[in-house]
Amino acid sequence: MKNLNIHADIRELSETLFADSIAAAMESRGLRWSPYVTGNAGSDDVVLDETSSDAKMGDTSVGLSQATRGIRLADQHWQRRVATGLTMVQALVQTAADNAKLVHDTVERARADFISSDEDIVITDYAKATNISWPFIDVTNGSIVDVPVTFMNTTPVTANLTRSRPQAYVFSRAWHDVADRLQAAGVVVDELYGDFEGQVEALNVTSSTVATSKYEGVVRTTVTTESVSKGVKIPAGGYWVSTRQKNAAHAFNVLEPENIDSYVTFNILPVDVGDEYQVYRVPV
């Protein structure tokens, strides 16, 4: 749970209480463990990326609802993975049971604090590059060897684009599919029963770069914007997304256009240079 829009207390609960309990359980059964990483290909320099803060990742998606969860594993090395998975699940459930009040109270307190918070929201972030040694298995003899690697550390990530938390997002009924997607993620979306007319923060697109390859069947778009204050009128039937709800962080990640998992990035809300982004931020 690396996304900085997940309440810090919930991230700490995941990274300390649960992660430490799971690690101890695996070590007690002679199993090695490490942070989850992905590697690069086609280079002699080993770069390991720790799991990212992307909202599309399963654990992050759940965490953005200000909650915590377990993990599933793939199907390679079946016997070891089953043993590891069982150990992790046992440790997860036992830790939750042994610390039920702490977990419950931490999550409930974090949710209440998140809903009322006036802190800036995080749009983009980056990992910290660290030169360390990483244990690998030598395939020629099965021994454990330490290999120098560049570890892209995301515990924690560092924010490099933030914005003030709006009171709400407001947009036209023309984008009803956006409202549907938000609701599917558990975000409360209210329909405007009367016209909305007022001052908003509008985002004008200043640059747009289309990726050279597809990601899971989609060519993603990276944009930059500049903010302007203006008056708008959204007719009745449009949508109002309050940020005073526990699932608001989902809205932050998909409605702020620069985010790596935004609806702009995935062309659900298509924009080009010079366009005014059609989701408006209502200031507090």
Image (spheres, rainbow, N blue to C red):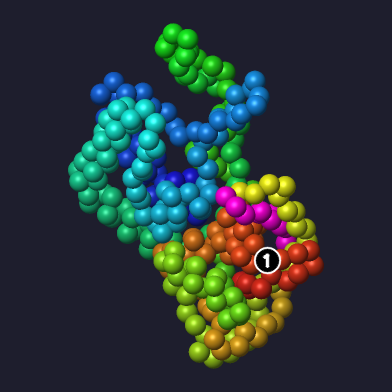
Residue name at image x 62 percent, y 58 percent: 266
Does 8 appear above or below 155? below
Determine if the magenta segment contains residue 166. Answer: no
Callout 1 amino acid: Pro
Residue 230 placed where, x, y %? 72, 78
Residue 283 lies in quadrant: bottom right
Is residue 153 in view? no
Q: Which residue is mark 1?
A: 270
Q: Quadrant of the C terminus?
A: bottom right
Answer left or right for 277 relative to 130: right
Is residue 232 in view? yes
Residue name at image x 47 percent, y 13 percent: 138
Residue name at image x 45 percent, y 70 percent: 183
Residue 5 placed where, x, y %? 50, 55
Does 237 appear above or below 147? below
In this view, the residue in front, 241 or 8, is 241
Q: How many marks?
A: 1
In this view, the residue in front, 137 or 77, is 77
Answer left or right for 90 relative to 240: left
Does 263 appear above or below 145? below
Q: Secondary structure at mark 1?
A: loop
Residue 272 placed where, x, y %? 75, 64
Residue 43 lies in quadrant: top right
Q: Residues within 10 Å of mark 1 (few under 14, many from 20)?
A: few
Residue name at image x 54 percent, y 73 percent: 177
Magenta region: 216-226
